Every structure is written in structure tokens, then in C-alpha cells.
Amino acid sequence: MTHRQLQLVLLSGVVIALAILPRVITDVYMLNVLVLTLMYAALSQSWNILGGYCGQISLGHALYFGVGAYATSVFYASFGITPWLGALAGGVISMLLALGLGYPCFRLKGHYFSIATIVIAEIGLLLVHNWDAVGGALGIQWPIGPDSWVTLQFARDKAPYVYLALGLFVITWLVTYWIEDSRWGFWWRAVKDNPEAAESLGVEVFRSKMAAAALSAFFTALGGGFYAAFVSYIDPESVMTFRFSLLFALPAVLGGIGTLWGPLVGAAVLIPLTEITRSYMGGSGNGLDLIIYGALIMIISLAKPEGILSLFHRNAKPDARP
Amino acid sequence: MTLQAFLQVLASGLLMGLLYALIAVGLSLIFGLMDVVNFAHGEFLMVAMYATFGLWLATSLDPVVLMPAVTALMFVLGALAYFGVVRFAMRARTNVGMVQIFATFGLAVLIQGLAQFFFSPDYRSIPKSWLGGKTLDIAGVFLPLPQVFGGLISLLAFAGLYLLMDRTDFGKALEATREDQGAVALVGIDRNRVFALGWGLGVALVGLAGVVLAIFYYIHPHVGGPFALIAYVVVALGGFGSVFGALAAGLIVGVIEALAATVLPPAMKSIAVYLLYLGVVFVRPSGLFGRL
């Protein structure tokens, strides 16, 4: 069995295990944590396409997440269009947005690029905040309806959300898996490692970045659409702030940036710890949850710069960068 | 807009700009020295504000008097942050940039948690001080005294920084370490010491701004974020690593923001600053005065 076939077998195992979990766990709170973990794994996997494989550190993906969440919510709440289509529309809008923004932004390098992404997402946040047609600062409340796979509303049983989040994760994983071995994958890694050398060898650097951005934005928006359906109420602060942009990058960085399994591993460590410390210690507002969360991020990123995954790859070559 | 009103907007913008420059210059200094973007910069500002508040509460001395003590405290904190966190982040062999971002981001969250733990998430303020609430009237242009004081401190800090960089051995060591980290070791400069002093200095500078802000601004655990974002924009606009680029960019940002506030709703005034940043870097990808 080749290495790549082994990855597929591993995925099947993980999917079966995760699909069984909602049958075992009946506690609504734990199911919530599971949904969020899978959702952030999928979102981080999407971020990883641009940030991890192509090396363009975006800290503004909250924009695409917000566009997905808003498109889905507006289509459903105002026109009764199913979130399946709404999320898809959000994905396409985000993709076009990423291409339009990428055109000027990909001329920028390093921190100038990252700060441009932060600033653009902030502009988006402020515009939505003051845009009354999409609810302005108040946001959008989803109409209450019966449980249904058409409207993606499940009031009593949280298991369907687990399957949806798992489905989203599997799709982003498969896309990443396919890309790793495609021409795009090789181009992206070349762009990440040394854009000048890549260019001189005939890699179309600009087109590579644009393709990575479009794909990454599309799936981030799908995640936004899912989140909106899951929480049934969104406002600008709950989907578009800088915190989200960091939360999409963080699992990939902690797990292993630019790797197939990094985002899932990172999310599996980070999200349950965050959620559990928040609910057990955050309620009092004494900041203990923040202290633990901050210390954890600091310690993992300092102790394992290559990510948690590197623990399992004793002989693997770390991805060498100058 | 009448000339009077225009001068008022310009003066307020310039004063706020000087303060933005003072907040940003520490970030710029640290970046120029060692290519580290400090994501905890806003939290250092917040700590300085709380330190001022705490010392004021304990001693009931005026913030102006407390300034040297708070600045010294921040210097120590900066050096500690280098030895405790950043030194390890720089050792990373792979994806150094991300490790720095998230190590300092983790530090930022940790500091926020500590602030909440010791001071609660409530909004605090220093209700009465020598400068608070007073204004200076120059030919019909009203200037709030705390901001005037902040502007003066900022100008003095930049002048001091210029002398330090230009005239002292420490400044030469900073410049040499910035040019070539390996070579300085050969001439007997301890790289770690220079970096720690650089961090101390950078954080002490944001500490000065924190004392000024504490006089006229609300103090809470998340106060740093918006200022940090402006500081990043200022530093990048001026050009990463360019100390005086930060001064120029700070002034430009302050004035643009004040002008925007006259035509846009208050919450939207930052959009003008963000668009300015994008406009500049799309034309000059290394900022106004950056070396790339």
C-alpha cells in the first residue's frame, strides 16, 4: 500500500469513529464541542490551502466566513432559500471576492500582505455593521421552523450537525489530498519556499496564489454558512471579527502547518480545551480561562514549532525554509 | 468647513497622530531590530494603563508623576517578554513567522486574562488628575491638555530615540545587530543582551503612551486591540523597521482619521485609515519609507 492509499484508509477510520461518536455521546454540551471541533478543523483545512501550502499568511479569513454566514442567513431569512444553496452562493461570492482582492494584494509580501488582509476584513466588518439591509449591528435571526434537512434546523437532536460538520471536513480534506499530489500542489509549495526560484522555473506564481485564495475562500464561506445554520443567529461581531481569522489559522499552526492532518489534530487539541475551560472557568469572568488558553497557545507554538504532528514523524524531514 | 473648524480638526488629528506614532514606534523598533511582529503590543499598552491606574489608586500621586515609574516597569516587562517568550520563538527552525505571531498572540491572551483576574473586566478610569478634563484655548482652537502633554512626550521620545540611535554605543550596537546578527557576535556584542534591551526600550515607549492614555481614556482588559491595529497600520504604512517612518505615518493617520470623522459616522472613521494603508502599499509595496 502506498503512502497516499494509507492516508485514505486513515481517513476512513477517522470518519467511521467520528460518525459513531454521536451515538455514544448523548450529552448536548459534548456534542456541541464536537461540532465546533470538526467545524474549525474544516475551516483551518481551508485556511491551510492558502496559508499552509501556498505560504500566504492571511489573517483576514473572517471576511469569507462572514460572507458565507451572511449570504446563507439573508437568503434563508428573507427569501426562504435553503441554506444548502445559500452557502453555495456565499462560497461563489467569496471566491470572486478573493480573486478581486487577490489581484492587488498578492503584489504584497510578508507582513505587508498579512496586515492588508487584516485591514480588508476590518473594512468588511465595519461595512456590514452599518449596512441596514443585512440587519446592521443587530444581525439576522433565523426563523424558527421544524427540524429538517432542507432548512438545516435541528432544535432537539444535535447529531445531524455533527454529520454536517464531518462532511464539510471530509470535503476539505479530500480537496487538500487531491491537491497535494497535483500540479497546483507542487506549484504552491514552490511559491511558498522560494517564489523567485519558482518563477524562473516557469511556475506561474501569481496564478498559483489566486487559485489557492479562491479555493480557500470558497470553503471558508461554506463553513460560515454551516455556522449560521448551526447557531441560527448571527451578527457582525459573532462572525466577522479578527478573532475568527486567528482561530482559522491557529489549529493548522498548532497541528502542523501545510500538512494534511495538521488542522484536525490542532483543532482536536485546541477547541475542546478552549470550550471546556471557558464553560468551567469563564463564567465567573475572572479571566482564568484566558490565562490557560493563552499559556497553552504560547507553550505549544514554542515547544513544537513544526506542530503537534511532528511528534509522530520521527524520521520525516521538516519542511525546510530558509 | 470654516478655517477655524479646519484648524481644530487638523490640530486634534496631529495630537492624536503623535500619540499613535508613540504607540507604534516600539513595534517598529522591535521589528527593525529582529524581524519580529509583536502581537502583544496592544496588551503592553493596556498593562501600562493598568499600572498607572493601580499606582494612582495605591499612592494617589498624579499620573504625570508616576510616568517614570511606569515606564521603568514596562522596560523590565519588555526585557522579560524577550527572555521568557521571544527568545524561544526565534529558535524555531521552521515557520518562524507563524511561531512568532502565535507565541506573542498567546502572550497577549494570557496578559488579558491576568488583567481580568486582577482588575475584573470592568471599565476603569482616573476621574481626577492635573491634566484630565482641562483644555488649552489657542485663538479659538481648543486642545485637550492630556493630548497636548501626550504630543510633547511623543516628540521628546522621538528626539531621545534619535540621540540614542545616533550618538550612543548602545544605538550603534542596535544598528549593527539589525544589520548582521552573526557578525556582531564576532566583535563581542552579546546579541541576547541587545535584543532584550531593544524589547525593553520598545515596550517602555508604548508604556509612555499608556500613561498618557490612562489620563483621558477608559481602561479595560481589551482596550489594547484597536490601538494595536492602528499601530500595525502605522508601522507598515511608514515602512517596517523605519522609526521615523512611524512618526510620519502616525501623523498622517491621525489627521486622516480626524478629517474622516467630520464626514463619516464615528464608527466608520477607521475605514479611511485602512483605505489609505491599502492605497499606499498597492503603489509602494514597502510602505512610505520602508527598505525592502
Image: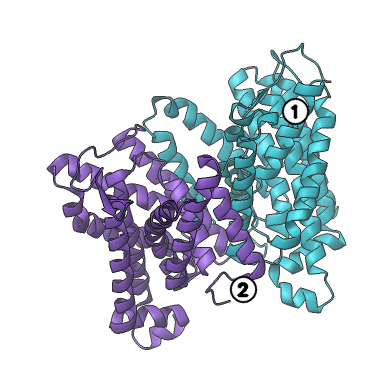
Chain colours: A cyan, B purple
At mark 2, the secondary structure is loop
Q: Residue at x 72, y 21 (%)?
A: A159
Relative horizontal placement of residue A222, taking residue B88 as reference (left or right):
right
Residue B192 in which image quadrant:
bottom left
Three-letter amino acid code at the position of disc 2: Pro
In depth, the one of A169 and B46 nearer the eye is B46
**Mark 2 sits on what residue?**
A322
Does the image show residue A320? no
Where is residue A156 shown, x and y percent of the image? 69, 12
Residue furthest out toward the top: A146
**Mark 1 sits on what residue?**
A74
Where is residue B188 shown, x and y percent of the image? 33, 85
In depth, the one of B225 and A123 nearer the eye is A123
Relative horizontal placement of residue B46, taking residue A21 as reference (left or right):
left
Instruction: Decide: few, some or many residues near mark 2? Use Cα within 10 Å; few <14, some 14-19, many ≥20.
Output: few
Q: Chain of mark 1?
A: A
Where is residue B261 shown, x and y percent of the image? 50, 47
At mark 1, the secondary structure is helix
Compare marks 2 and 1 and give the one earlier in the sequence.
Answer: 1
Instruction: Decide: few, some or many residues near mark 1? Use Cα within 10 Å; few <14, some 14-19, many ≥20.
Output: many
Relative horizontal placement of residue A208, taking residue B21 as reference (left or right):
right
Which quadrant is the C terminus of chain A positioned in? bottom right
Which of the labelled discs sits on residue B78, or is there none? none
- Contact, mark 2 vs mark 1 (Cβ under 8 Å): no
